[in-house]
Image (tube, rainbow, N blue to C red):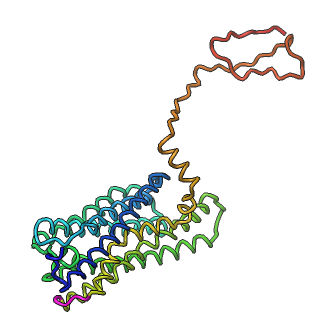
Amino acid sequence: MADNCTWFGSSSQCVTITTVKRITATFSLIGCACMLVIIWLFRKYNSLAQKMIVSLAIAAFFDSIAYVMGEVLPDGVLCNFQAWWLTYFDWCALAWVCSITLNLYLNVVKEMRTDQYQLTYHFTAWGVPFILSCLPLFGDLYGPAGAWCWITDDHVAWRFVIWYVPLFSLIFLMMLCYLRIIYVAKQRVITWSGTYDPRRERSKIIMAEEIKPLKWYPCVYLAVSLFPLLNRIHNAFYPSHPVFILTLLHVMSAPLHGLANTIVFVLDKETWSQLTMASLRVAFQSRLCDRTKITEYHPASVRYMTQIDEEESDSADDTTVLFSMPSMALRNKEP
């Protein structure tokens, strides 16, 4: 690792940067794994919004793997693969946050059902990042770029075209969307007109509760992207003089969006209330130990009848037979 360290004069600084990067990325990796386990345990994948959060967690999980990749790689095939992997899953995670925001906007503001757009979301969130991450491969733009492989210092403009300009533009648009969503949702909750419809009023309250955790996902990307942006801007003007503190803050924040997404997910009121020992035990038993089989009930073999037996019962007894099987013979009593 010290032999491949070219951005700092001291090898100890290189070791510190790489170690911090691996630690923060490991926390994100563990957080994403825990998030996926919670989703699996409590079956939080029924609605379209929940499925999109699952996809976001998967993208963040694989993105964390790229940051965990340990030592600084020299320019070559492995370095290019690491750079492509990092670019692809960074974009996938961002694309799923944008898709979640768009889906919520269509649900709340436009009052549209979006279940039919599920394949479109998947095609966009997995397909467009693949195209964007492959573009630097054609120009051989990937290579050693500090603590990991990415677009090299010789192609600074590509860094902003491929990632930073779209990133902050999309974050700004998502913030505007959430402001509109929150405004419309509040207006619908406090406004009453026409005939009272309990289902509609309940859906308004549920939608307002769903907005609260989802609005934090763009904020997560904004928070973890500020220091990387500052460091890359400094690298653009002074490529031969990196600042250790800026680089350290860069490697501390950039891999953390997976962990931050997990924190946002866990702090949701409903999810947090389920994270008790009793709820976890029941969920594990339901997932791993439930062997109950439910078979179909066939009522065709049951025949309903009424039987009145005056000789064997008095007037105070209820002698109505609810049903009898076909093997039981009918007994008709004469009055």
Q: Is residue 209 magenta?
A: no
Residue nearer the viewer, 245 or 52: 245
- Figure check: 45 above or below 137: above
Write the residue at 47% across / 55% down: 44
Image quarter in which the C terminus is found: top right
Please identify the quarter of the rendering in which residue 204 is found: bottom right
Write the residue at 20% across / 81% down: 11
- Pinpoint residue 233: horizontal percent, then vertical percent: 25, 87
Write the residue at 45% across / 62% down: 112
Please identify the quarter of the rendering in which residue 19 is found: bottom left
Magenta range: 239-243
- Figure check: 193 above or below 55: below
Residue closest to the far front: 12
- Pinpoint residue 68: horizontal percent, then vertical percent: 28, 67
Taking 296 as reference, is 65 left or right?
left
Our reading of the magenta stretch's main secondary structure is loop
Taking 91 as reference, is 302 left or right?
right
Write the residue at 42% across / 68% down: 261
Residue nearer the viewer, 59 or 6: 6
